[in-house]
Image (cartoon, helix red, strand yellow):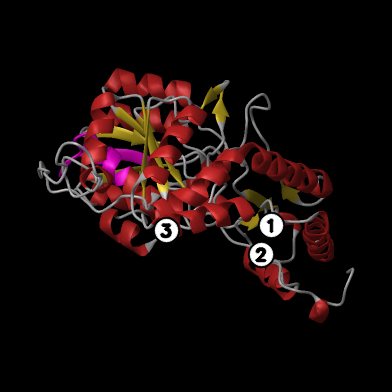
Amino acid sequence: MIQQLDELTALPFALPDIGDAEIAEVVDTLQSGWLTTGPKTRKFEQDFADRIGVKHALAVNSATAGLHLSLEACGIKRGDKVLTTTMTFTATAEVIRYFGADPVFVDIDPATFNMDVAAVRAILENTTGIKAIMPVHFAGEACDMDPLLKLADQHGLKVIEDAAHALPTTYKGRMIGTLGDATVYSFYVTKTLATGEGGMVVTNDDEMAARIKIMRLHGISKDVFDRYQLSDKPTWHYDVVNPGFKYNMTDIAASIGLHQLQKIDRFASRREQIANAYGEAFKDLPVRCPKNSRPDDQHAWHLYVLRLDLEKLSIDRNRFIELMNERKIGTSVHFIPLHLQSYWSNKYDLKPQDFPVASKTFECIVSLPIYTKMRDDDVARVIDAVKTILKDATI
């Protein structure tokens, strides 16, 4: 080791990369007196729509809210079914339950951890009542969207993409966000664009956009910015057209997002540099490194998920994490598959053997730090720790 273990400072699993521009914009917002949804949010939405190449971008207070609104705009109701992956955070599936609808889980591709298209096809051929597909672009790599979109078209299904990891990600030269009926991004503090909390729904569907805009703020016909502006005509009047939700983004969050968005390509380049450094350093170790399966496309590298070859090691994944923690290096696991979580397994009588790839994969994966505030010596420290631990544990 470069330093004694007890001398090392903690290297967290993730940190946001907030600069002077974001801070100045937030201060400007605070001094303006307009803190909730207003001019900064509108500009953020327009800039985001332009960056993705879509007609509509609708800012919300979380990706969870965005997924909920998107399904609501699709008309999902009690008794319907929505097909999604088991290898995701619970938010992807929980929004389906908000309607009294049911998720139908699918296993993963062993190479990318994205939805197994063959498994999707088999489920659609043998299951009634499915109204939508929700693919998750795992770790920042696009799902194989062409066959999924074809299947959706054949079965008359909506496609709502969970792109919480996937900014900026492309698929066959097309931006994620331009493919399905709606796409939802997360701006949680660990994401590739961070506003602390927040998210964005993008769509080219005018009707979906209009519905989401109304339902994200109590189902009223105007947003708060419209109702409190001085103008030649009274603007106080509004109409409640549906019982909606309180899902709007604040101008404080949008102020951060405006400048994070301007940096997104630089952020992506740095994450890719770190991923490449890890891949080169670990290539001779008893692990399987994640790769961009479509080298001509952009992988967002939100996560770097290392797969340990446990048959060649004297330690398991949990012990590996403990040894990394002893070196004060943060790690995580993405994800504990939903079929292994008590609510989902009990509710739908799910067993590990129902999803053999995801179940086996879960036992051996660990996510390493990969974020833009990591310095080269931080990356070297992670590499050194992984090499030391795995070489000592190799059978």
Q: Are marks 1 and 3 in contact (CB under 8 Å)?
A: no
Residue at 33 percent of width and 38 percent of height? 83
Residue 340: mark in rendering: 3
Front-most of residues 104 and 4: 4
Q: Residue 28 appears at what percent x and percent y?
A: 49, 54
Mark 1 falls on what kind of element?
A: helix
Magenta segment includes 141: no
**On the image, numbered disc 2 is attached to which residue?**
316
**Mark 1 → mark 2, Cα distance in angstroms:** 6 Å
Q: Residue 210 appears at what percent x and percent y?
A: 24, 32
Q: Amino acid at mark 3?
A: Leu
Find the residue positioned furthest to the front.
232
Front-most of residues 124 and 261: 261
- Total tally of numbered discs in the picture: 3
Mark 3 falls on what kind of element?
A: helix
Establish if 34 lies above or below 165.
below
Residue 172: mark in rendering: none
Can residue 85 be seen from the camera position used here? no
Numbered range of the magenta stretch:
67-84
Q: Amino acid at mark 2?
A: Asp
Residue at 70 percent of width and 39 percent of height? 269
Q: Are marks 3 and 2 in contact (CB under 8 Å)?
A: no
